[in-house]
Amino acid sequence: MAVELAVVCPERPDSEQVARLVGPLISMILRCPPVRALVDDDADIWTVHWGSVSAVVDQLPPGRHEFGESWVLTAAAGEGGIDLSLLLTIVTAAAIAITVEGRIIDDASLVGGGNHSGGELLVRAVGGHERSVVAALTALGSHVWGQ
């Protein structure tokens, strides 16, 4: 199973703007000291780094997929199966969706399947009293967590 989320966007988001959102969002979700996210922007692929984990974002411009005139960005975990990488992937997809009013397409059911806004995922991620990585992933409601 692929560990990725697609985000359908009306325009190409700015990688630096996404990185500026990702760091504070994950730090807030986990209630940890602020950790800045960094991004390596290499034309069609970005790598978002948060601490020692990463998420890779692949970009498809309009006309190269089934979503018409939209951009499609796919966020995938940089390290397979590591909980913090999965959370970073989800938060990166949410940040992309927030910056350009995009929608997250969860075909792999990483966060329960379906079509989500970035804000919907963030509200679910911060739910509950505990803020461990596992608690945040559990709050997102995926059947994948805890297996």
Image (spheres, helix red, strand yellow):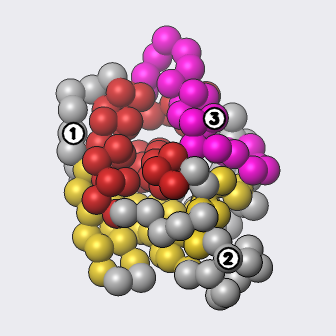
Residue situated in front as seen by the camera: 55 or 22: 22
Residue 53, visible in the rendered structure: no
Q: What residue sits 51% from the left and 55% below the top? A: 100
Label of residue 69 in the image: 2
Q: Residue at x 70, y 82 (%)?
A: 65
Return the residue found at the far bottom: 64
Circle on res. 35:
1
Percent across and percent down for residue 68 are 73, 78
Identified by mark 3, the residue type is: Glu
Quarter of the image for residue 66 reads bottom right
Kind of residue indicated by mark 2: Glu
Disc 3 vs disc 2: which is toward the camera? 2
**Residue that carries the numbered disc 3 in the rendered image:** 120
Magenta stretch?
111-132
Amino acid at circle 1: Val
- x%, y% of residue 1? 67, 67
**Percent from the top left, x then y, of residue 75?**
51, 63
Asked whether the beta carbons under mark 3 and mark 2 sit within 8 Å of each other, the answer is: no
Q: Work out which residue is located at the far top of the displayed protein and give it.
A: 129
